[in-house]
Structures are given as C-alpha cells and as structure tokens.
Image: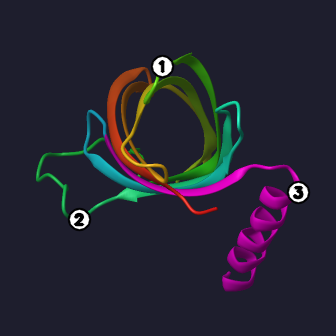
Amino acid sequence: MKAKVTLSILLSVLFSYAFAQQLFVGSYVENTCINAKLGTRIGLLTNQGFEVGGFYQSESKIFQSKENKPLFYEKEFFGVFMAAPVLVRDNYQLKLNVRTGAVNKINFAITPSIVMDYKLFNQVSLNGGIGVKALKPTLQAGIRINIL
C-alpha cells in the first residue's frame, strides 16, 4: 500500500511539472442525513481551474450518533473526482464537482455537488458546498492546499 501511495505521489509531481499543473491536497467534512464523514483528497489543478484526482472518506468516531442506522449505509467511499469551474471571480470560484467510486468496497456511486472555493492565500483555499448522495442532500466544507 505504501508503495502505491508513494508511486502515485511521484507520478503526480512528474505530471505537474510536465503539464504546468499544480498538485494539491485537501481535507473535508461531509454531513449526510445519517452522519458526518471525514475525507481527504489529492489531485491536480490546471491553470483553467479544472481539478482531477482521487479521494477517500470514511465515517468518523467524532461525529457518530447513537441513533439507529440503516442496515446498508456508507462506512467508506473512495474513488476519483473531477471538478469544472462554472463561475470565476477574483478570489471566488463556483465549481461543479463529481465524485465516482466504490462505497463499502461493494457498491458503485456517483455523487454530484456544487462547491464554492474561496482563495485565502496563494496556496490555501477554503471550500463549501452542497451535493446529493443517495438522492438526499449533503453539506460539505473543507480546505485545499496547493503543494507545487
């Protein structure tokens, strides 16, 4: 597993230099109708504002509730994401984000969302948005740090 992660980071750095893209990492919280989930993502950001990369999210012990949960609910979700800018202003960007991947290593899911990025500094952006997961609304908030 460590070799795969190291290889993916190395390839991302090489592609970022080759195609003038920025490598970024991010962390986020997504609140669903059942419980909140913590996630992390790594990807490439183009000069035009497009994003592509991979993500992993899982339920957090911090946000777990004592309520009864459905028999089949999302414990972990991982895969790839793509984001395209819809509206760009000075420090703000409105993006259409689509995550596609495996839920609990069994099911396949596609989750669209609309995310607003606010650029705090040259390398740091805050984001928040709304999305749909299992035909129910979700709220998202996170941070993105550009590495290169």
Q: Residue at x 34, y 29 (%)?
A: 138
Secondary element at tag 1: loop
**Quick check: is 57 in the magenta stretch?**
no
- Residue 83 visible, this angle: yes
Q: Distance between the residues labelled 2 and 3?
A: 40 Å
In percent of width and height, residue 123 lies at 49, 54
Side (left or right) of 57 relative to 106: left
| 2 or 3: tag closer to the N-terminus | 3
Side (left or right) of 88 relative to 65: right
The correct choice, above or below, for 87 with respect to 133 in the image is above
Q: Which residue is drawn at 64% across and 32% down?
A: 49
Crowd band around label 3 with a 10 angstrom C-alpha radius: few (<14), some (14–19), many (20+): few
- Which residues make up the magenta segment? 1-30
Residue on which the image places disc 3: 18
Crowd band around label 2 with a 10 angstrom C-alpha radius: few (<14), some (14–19), many (20+): few
The correct choice, above or below, for 88 with respect to 1 in the image is above
Which residue type carries mark 3?
Ala
| 1 or 3: tag closer to the N-terminus | 3
Number of marks in the rendered image: 3
The quarter of the rendered structure image containing the C terminus is bottom right
Q: Which of 37 and 146 is in front in this view?
A: 146
| 2 or 1: tag closer to the N-terminus | 2
Residue on which the image places disc 1: 89
Crowd band around label 1 with a 10 angstrom C-alpha radius: few (<14), some (14–19), many (20+): few
